Image (cartoon, rainbow, N blue to C red):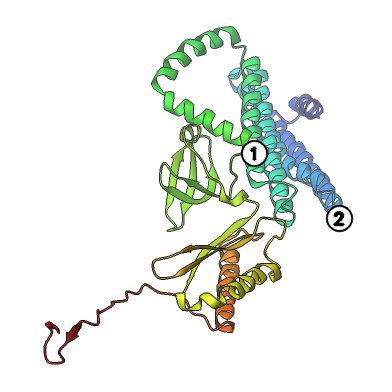
Amino acid sequence: MFDYLKTCCELAEGSLNGKYGWFWDIGTIMLIIVLFNFGLKQLLCFLQRYFKEHNQLGKESFVTSLYLPYSYYVWFFAGVEMLDFTTLQIFSKSFLPQKEMILEIGVIAALAWFLLRWKNAVISLFVKQYSSNKALYGATRIDVINKIATVLIFLIAGLLLLEVTGSNLNTLIAFGGISGLAVAFASQEVIASFFGGLMIYITQPFAIGDWILLPEKDIEGHVEEIGWYTTKVRTFEKSPIYIPNSIFSKIVVINPSRMSHRRFKETIGIRYNDVRALREILAGFKAIFRNNPNIDQTMSNTVYFAAFGPSSLDIVLSAYSRETTSDGFALIKEEILFSVIDVLNQNGAELAFPTTCLEIPSAIKVSPHSAVPQTS
């Protein structure tokens, strides 16, 4: 298409050069460029509306991403051609001896720009689908696709530029190997963090939005961003913490967001005076777990009399809830504790609290007017 446009410009130059002068040639070239660009815009707008009406979002994103790079390159092409034509007419020689290479560099830049725009449009589609159906795509998976695609686009554009400019790739590789070795010694931590981020994307011990715990660093919070060098964690105090990715290969990471169940475990102490109702209380506590729909009955849910405490009869309650979120589990735990109180009230029992009993021998008499005990 650009060859056709170039041919039209050359024909305009040849037909008008003798009759009206080179000034009119420039005007003719501008008119051709404007008409060509206008026709292209109308065609792309029509295709965009068509694909949108037929819900072909992938094709719509392709057409939408194409217009600006294509249009800008048309004007870039026209500017280079007019500059070359003008210098030839005024100075009888061109100031752009490498015009073809400049135009090829422009093509590569426009192509890279288009691919970046198309990549961003596709990523936006993934994000929308993730919002409506979280089982389809993960936020971390979308993020890694975005980063890898960006790196590949720049890598391909760089290799094409080397090819167009005639650079010796072997020389660049040799120079890059020597300089890369020197940089590697000076930036070991940076390289370690880079590969640490790569391993996080591959192994996925956690994802964006997960609640993680680093016991050795006393860090706990939700993952907000996974970068190539650092991972951003927002603590429960809403303070951001930026952790180098190299740390995650050296320490234990606990991911509570991925637990299948959440354990409820409490020790309930009742008075020694309620020992006669102990069996009925145990049966009532077991019924609490048995009748609660949030408790997974396939798990090991236990209620047992554990010990004779210093001032209480200790009963251990342990069960597993399907609800793992903090807010949801807190409500379930509150409901179970209220049910425990109801069972105690039904059996006339009470919760124990630390008490101390003093036994005074009958041989000791205490005078009501004196704090000193008297012996008989």
Residue type marked 1: Asn
The residue located at (56%, 50%) in the rendering is 256
> How many neighbours does mark 1 have within 10 angstroms: few (below 14), some (14-19), or many (20 or more)?
some
Nearest to viewer (mark 2 / mark 1): 1
> Quadrant of the rendered structure where residue 272 is?
bottom left
Residue occupied by mark 2: 53
**Residue 144 vertical position relative to residue 2 in the rendered view, above or below:** below
> How many neighbours does mark 2 have within 10 angstroms: few (below 14), some (14-19), or many (20 or more)?
few
**Residue 237 vertical position relative to residue 276 in the rendered view, above or below:** above
Is residue 271 visible in the rendered image? The answer is: no
Left or right: where 190 falls relative to 62: left
The residue located at (60%, 70%) in the rendering is 282
Question: Under tag 2, what secondary structure?
Answer: helix
Left or right: where 95 falls relative to 112: left
Question: Under tag 1, what secondary structure?
Answer: helix
Which sits in the foreground, 341 or 119?
A: 341
The residue located at (58%, 7%) in the rendering is 170
x and y, in percent, of residue 38 in the image: 77, 45
Is residue 196 visible in the rendered image? The answer is: yes
Return the residue found at the far bottom.
369
Tell me the quadrant of the picture where the N terminus can be found.
Answer: top right
Tell me the quadrant of the picture where the C terminus can be found.
Answer: bottom left
Which sits in the foreground, 103 or 305?
A: 305
Residue occupied by mark 1: 146
x and y, in percent, of residue 244 in the image: 45, 36
Left or right: where 342 falls relative to 35: left
Residue type marked 2: Glu
Comes first in the chain, label 2 or label 1: 2
**Residue 177 vertical position relative to residue 147 in the rendered view, above or below:** above
> Quadrant of the rendered structure where residue 359 is?
bottom left
